[in-house]
Amino acid sequence: MRKHFQYILFFLSILIVYELYLIISFKYVDIQKDLIITNTQKDIIDRKEILQNKKDYFAYINTNAYKDKIAKSSQNKKNPWEEVSFIVTKDEVEQYKKLDVQKQMYSEKEIKSPTYWMSNWQKWIYYIFKKDIRD
């Protein structure tokens, strides 16, 4: 009879451990779901904030003041009622007159790499050790 009670006790202890396992596992899954929900809510709030910032930025870009600022800075334009004057010295004017603008615009400079005439193994040494071994 005693053996019979021991089996029942063992079975009930196994059952209790299994129920504890189920309770802990369900609670863990519940906590994970709550974390996912809160992280998703935070992500939604962040995305709404980013979207609002982008809307504000695009609204600013579409204003006439911004377009006027960009036209003045990048295209050297001015409004009809404005006067623009550049203040330069005589030395700067003389230096500008000495520049050969056409030559600078249409000359093609070929700047060759220091590894241009190197063989493949010499290039590897140059890139790894920064040492030119051609000399």
Image (cartoon, helix red, strand yellow):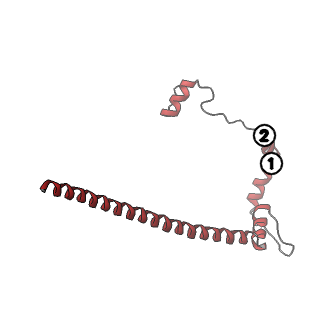
The front one of 20 and 116 is 20
Q: Rate crowding at label 2 as few (under 14), some (14 to 19) or many (20 or more) other CA atoms within 10 Å.
A: few
Q: Which corner quadrant of the image does residue 14 belong to? A: bottom left
Q: Helix, strand or loop at disc 1?
A: helix
Q: Farthest right residue?
A: 80
* Residue at point 62%, 26% (across, down): 117
Residue 85 at x, y percent in the picture: 79, 69
Kindly identify which residue carries mark 1: 101
Mark 2–mark 1 distance (CA, rounded to whole Å): 10 Å
**Quarter of the view holding residue 24:** bottom left
| Residue 49 percent across, percent down from the top left | 60, 71
Question: From the viewer's perspective, is the residue at label 2 or at label 1 nearer?
Answer: 2
Depicted 32 relative to depicted 98: above or below: below
How many numbered marks appear?
Answer: 2
Tell me if residue 4 comes above or below residue 78 in the rendering: above
Give the answer, above or below, for where 120 lies relative to 23: above
Seen as rendered, the residue at the extreme left is 2
Instruction: Examine the rendering and report whether any part of residue 135 can be seen.
Output: no
Kindly identify which residue carries mark 2. Answer: 107
Residue at 46%, 64% (x, y): give it. Answer: 33
Kind of residue at badge 2: Ser
Q: Nearer the viewer, residue 28 or 91?
A: 28
Q: Nearer the viewer, residue 84 or 2?
A: 2
Given residues 33 and 100, the one toward you in this image is 33
Looking at the rendered structure, the kind of residue marked 1 is Val
Q: Which badge, 2 or 1, is on the more N-terminal residue?
A: 1
Percent across and percent down for residue 110 are 71, 35
Relative image position of residue 86 (x, y in whole percent): 77, 66
**Residue under the image location 28 percent in, 59 percent down:** 15
Quadrant location of the N terminus in the rendered image: bottom left
- State whether residue 74 appears in this view: yes
